[in-house]
């Protein structure tokens, strides 16, 4: 088997003819799709390859970044046409082996770029015809109300663009393609940063209350599109419709909150110990805020950052999750229209859809004054190191291994719906999802029985069906993680009470799962698996429960159910929960925008949304003003 370091569209066609058992002919009109199927065919040494190769080739990495896949799936024959770098012979699609996310790449005869990784074998599959895109089906015509189309620009900096890799977005409920987005190149990222910094010069001169008025208009524009945008969140991310609409509502709410805050931000005037002097704390915007968000809240998390950053006088550059690019585009179109109506530079709220290369560039870029990152602890560590290396500011909102603790005096009528909501909401894909349910030994069996009964009544279905309470996982990779976690739990002594199955239907559906019998320090219990698996633990004492709550690496959200007020205040105190969110008699999920959102330890320490989180988007200066005719120096020093 020969190692291929270079490859062209023509060579792919030659390869297909040499390795498939069926006879293929070159299409008369190269613009017509020509599906080719070749499955795991080897490349033999006698084949002479011309060095015309892919524009781009990305090696797919496993989630932890430890291993490389030598095999990728390719789709051939979607379209052909002119391109500024050459002439398309055809296009191909890389199919991620876990997530099923397709990346459309252009093949050209005008570029010579070496592959980053030697290719040992290839696997081909036919490309879906353009007519199969959901956006072209009458049922999904509402997508065009958001300005979306078959192929969408994924870069905005006052003008729309996108010259990079083309990504196809898929619906998790049926794994059908929705539409495509052209991502940013590093050159476009560079251009966007320059335009954003120029736009800052305009935006920061506008008084804060006037900036608040613009944010109010953004909130109103979102409110007008709340149902259709919420439907897109449901379609592309997979969360149920009511959650999709609720997520857009969070952006609206934080806009309303920011409007009031725009008249209140500032520092105190402090008493000076020197006569004729004033001591002032001055707050100014940091400048350019880079916002990197995750797939599970593709609207709200951007909104928390964007609204507060704007009223503080900053401009924003957003990189959304690569699996929810249509939502990023739709939100940006809404915001851009408001800026345009007010004759303001669009680059005030810029966007670059992209992968790890764009995120890395943002983290390393000294011109990005603050990087707000929401995502996994693993990637958060990498981002943190890159930002810290340049002594930049960072706001991290990472994972959570959240616990509900149920004491013997708890009101079980509150416990059951709280635990079910927090454990299965968004199919277990929230940072604040309850993953550990700690039950006092006196109520353990009863609570398990009642929650199991409730789980079996959860309505599973299409996320846009208003009767559905539980939708699909976001990717096929998540399904694999779900199965792997269940197997590990069994090996470590766990007993499956309900669930633990992949559902026999289209899409990424799994049954919400309850597992009992594990030790509190079992490795799987200490692992944040972003899927709907609830580990039920049995405890004997308050001290034991509090200690178990705090022994995991993350520190995002926590809750106890009790009527004992002494216990409540011990829980809130220094020996209680070490989380950023410490609740009593409510779920771990469902935070209000008025409070600061974030956590401790491996959750990152950042705070978003309410309270005084605005301070993270500003820099503080201490200013001493002498308005007297004297000059009293420190330590009483005098110069004659």
Image (cartoon, grey):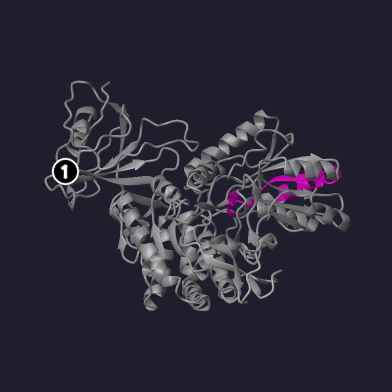
| Residue 143 location (% of width, % of height) | 39, 65
Q: Residue at x 49, y 41 (%)?
A: 477
- Residue 111 falls in which quadrant of the image? top left
Q: Residue at x 53, y 47 (%)?
A: 509
Q: Element type at marker 1?
A: loop
Is residue 401 at least partly visible in the picture? yes
Q: In the displayed structure, does residue 277 sit left or right of residue 562?
A: left
- Sort mark 1 into few (<14), some (14-19) or many (20+) by Cα contacts within 10 Å: some
Q: Is residue 565 above or below residue 208?
A: above
Q: Which residues are magenta?
A: 426-453
Q: Residue furthest left?
A: 28
Is residue 410 at least partly visible in the picture? no
How many numbered marks are there? Answer: 1
| Residue pointed to by mark 1 | 110
In what quadrant of the picture does the N terminus appear? top left
Q: Is residue 351 magenta?
A: no
| Residue 422 location (% of width, % of height) | 66, 53
Q: Is residue 51 above or below residue 549?
A: above
Q: Is residue 76 above or below residue 215?
A: above
| Residue 462 location (% of width, % of height) | 51, 56
| Residue 194 location (% of width, % of height) | 35, 60
In what quadrant of the picture does the C terminus appear? bottom right
Q: Residue at x 47, y 56 (%)?
A: 369
Q: Residue at x 58, y 45 (%)?
A: 530
Q: In the displayed structure, does residue 259 sit left or right of residue 545?
A: left
- Residue 344 falls in which quadrant of the image? bottom left
Q: Is residue 403 above or below residue 343?
A: above
Q: Is residue 428 magenta?
A: yes
Q: Which one is in front, 593 or 102?
A: 593
């Amino acid at each position: 088997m020969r190692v291929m370091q270079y490859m062209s569209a023509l060579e792919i066609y030659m390869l297909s003819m040499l390795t498939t058992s069926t006879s293929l002919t070159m299409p008369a009109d190269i613009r017509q799709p020509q599906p080719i199927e070749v499955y795991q065919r080897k490349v033999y040494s006698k084949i002479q390859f011309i060095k015309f190769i892919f524009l781009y080739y990305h090696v797919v990495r496993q989630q932890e970044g430890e291993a490389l896949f030598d095999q990728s799936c390719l789709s051939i024959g979607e379209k052909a046409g002119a391109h500024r770098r050459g002439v398309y012979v055809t296009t191909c699609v890389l199919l991620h082996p876990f997530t099923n996310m397709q990346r459309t790449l252009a093949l050209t005869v005008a570029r010579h770029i070496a592959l980053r990784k030697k290719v040992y074998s290839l696997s081909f599959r036919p490309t879906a015809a353009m007519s199969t895109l959901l956006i072209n089906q009458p049922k999904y015509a509402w997508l065009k109300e958001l300005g979306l189309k078959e192929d969408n620009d994924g870069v905005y900096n006052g003008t729309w663009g996108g010259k990079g890799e083309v990504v196809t977005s898929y619906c998790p409920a049926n794994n059908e393609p929705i539409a495509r987005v052209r991502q940013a190149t590093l050159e476009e990222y560079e251009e966007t940063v320059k335009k954003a910094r120029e736009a800052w010069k305009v935006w920061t001169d506008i008084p804060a209350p006037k900036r608040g008025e613009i944010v109010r208009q953004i909130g109103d524009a979102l409110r007008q599109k709340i149902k259709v945008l919420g439907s897109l969140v449901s379609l592309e991310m997979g969360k149920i419709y009511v959650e999709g609409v609720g997520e857009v509502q969070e952006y609206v709410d934080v806009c309303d909150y920011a409007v009031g805050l725009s008249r209140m931000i500032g520092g105190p005037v402090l008493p000076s110990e020197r006569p004729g002097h004033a001591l002032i704390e001055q707050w100014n915007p940091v400048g350019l805020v880079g916002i990197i968000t995750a797939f599970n809240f593709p609207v709200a998390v951007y909104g928390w950052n964007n609204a507060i950053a704007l009223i503080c006088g900053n401009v924003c550059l957003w990189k959304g999750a690569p699996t929810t690019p249509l939502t990023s585009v739709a939100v940006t179109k809404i915001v851009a229209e408001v800026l345009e109506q007010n004759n303001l530079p669009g680059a005030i709220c810029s966007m670059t859809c992209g992968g790890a290369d764009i995120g890395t560039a943002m983290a390393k870029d000294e011109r990005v004054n603050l990087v707000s990152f929401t995502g996994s602890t693993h990637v958060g560590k990498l981002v943190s190191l890159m930002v810290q290396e340049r002594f930049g500011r960072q706001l991290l909102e990472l994972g959570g291994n959240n616990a509900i603790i149920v004491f013997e005096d708890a009101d079980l009528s509150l416990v059951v719906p709280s635990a079910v909501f927090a454990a299965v909401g968004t199919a277990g894909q929230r940072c604040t999802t309850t993953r550990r349910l700690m039950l006092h030994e006196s109520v353990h069996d009863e609570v398990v029985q009642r929650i199991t009964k409730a789980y079996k009544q959860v309505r599973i279905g299409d996320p846009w069906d208003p009767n559905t309470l539980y939708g699909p996982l976001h990717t096929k990779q998540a399904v694999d993680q779900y199965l792997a976690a269940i197997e590990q739990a069994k090996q470590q002594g766990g007993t499956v009470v309900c669930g633990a199955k992949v559902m026999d239907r289209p899409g990424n559906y799994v049954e919400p799962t309850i597992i009992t019998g594990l030790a509190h320090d079992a490795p799987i219990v200490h692992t944040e698996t972003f899927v709907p698996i609830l580990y039920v633990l049995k405890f004997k004492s308050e001290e034991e429960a509090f200690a178990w709550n705090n022994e995991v690496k993350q520190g995002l959200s926590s809750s106890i159910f009790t009527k004992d007020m002494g216990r409540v205040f011990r829980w809130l105190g220094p020996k209680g929960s070490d989380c950023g969110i410490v609740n009593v008699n409510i779920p771990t999920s469902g935070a209000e925008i008025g409070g600061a959102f974030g956590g401790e330890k491996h959750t990152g320490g950042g705070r978003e949304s309410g309270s005084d989180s605005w301070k993270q988007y500003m820099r503080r200066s201490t200013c001493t003003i002498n308005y007297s005719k004297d000059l009293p120096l420190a330590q009483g020093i005098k110069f004659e």
